[in-house]
Amino acid sequence: DTGVSQDPRHKITKRGQNVTFRCDPISEHNRLYWYRQTLGQGPEFLTYFQNEAQLEKSRLLSDRFSAERPKGSFSTLEIQRTEQGDSAMYLCASLIGAGGLVETQYFGPGTRLLVL
Amino acid sequence: GDSVTQMEGPVTLSEEAFLTINCTYTATGYPSLFWYVQYPGEGLQLLLKATKADDKGSNKGFEATYRKETTSFHLEKGSVQVSDSAVYFCALGSGSARQLTFGSGTQLTVLP
């Protein structure tokens, strides 16, 4: 068990460009979450997958954002036409669970995005 | 919607001092409550959790009790160490997805 990994760890892009981030959850974790964390704030929920199905999306997830988890393992988060306001740390978390109360989300190290 | 209000920082303490970081929440239903810690240069790690009223979570000398009557989950430690210097986040888990709603974090610095 190597934990949740994310790639890249850092990304600098110019406004208007598209970027894609990858998250590899802990193996056999069926739930995967994406969060966004801006400087000095706590993480904010973006979206959630159970296996390959995207079951919930926050209103923070504008139509420029899309997430996939095609085989129920790794996930990608794409941002199209990036804006300076997209600059943040993007966090991925996973857990194994079936809807109970005691599950713990395990977080990856995050991808820090800077839009110039 | 659900929300978490956390004591603002930064907090600076001397080693062996007593620590309290206040956390209150607003939620419908019966959320689970968590404290996560983020050490410099590292990712979020679960520190402790509680899933129902009056439960006490504890780990590494830290404790927090789920108080439904005051909607609080205050973090305490009797004697802090320099190695406890980090950012602490209070969070609640709710909804069908059990997604986490976080407070804004409290920066703790412990001086030797």
Image (cartoon, helix red, strand yellow):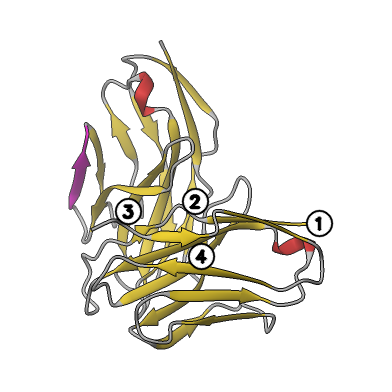
Identify which amino acid the numbered label 3 is placed on.
Phe
Mark 4 and mark 1: Cα distance apart in space: 21 Å
Q: CA distance from mark 3 to mark 4?
A: 16 Å
The numbered mark at residue B5 is 2
Q: Which residue is mark 1?
A: A116
User: Please, what is the dominant secondary structure of the magenta stretch?
Assistant: strand
Q: Amino acid at mark 2?
A: Thr
Residue B77 x %, y %: 28, 29
**Element at label 2:** strand
For marks 3 and 2, the one nearer the N-term is 2
Eye-nearest disc, 1 or 3:
1
- The chain identifier of the residue carrying mark 3 reads B
Give the secondary structure at mark 3: strand
Please name the residue that numbered disc 3 is placed on: B34
Query: Residue A46's spot in the image, x, y percent?
Result: 53, 72
Q: Which-is-in-front pick, marks 2 and 4?
A: 4
- Badge 2 and badge 1 in a common chain: no
The magenta stretch is: B55-60
Label 1 SS:
loop
- Residue at 75% of width from left, 70% of height from top? A82
Magenta span includes A8? no
Q: Quadrant of residue B88?
A: top left
Residue identifier under label 4: A35
- Camera-near label (3 vs 2) is 3
Specify the subunit that label 1 lies on. A
Rendered view: B112 above or below A115? above
Q: Nearer the viewer, mark 2 or mark 1?
A: 1
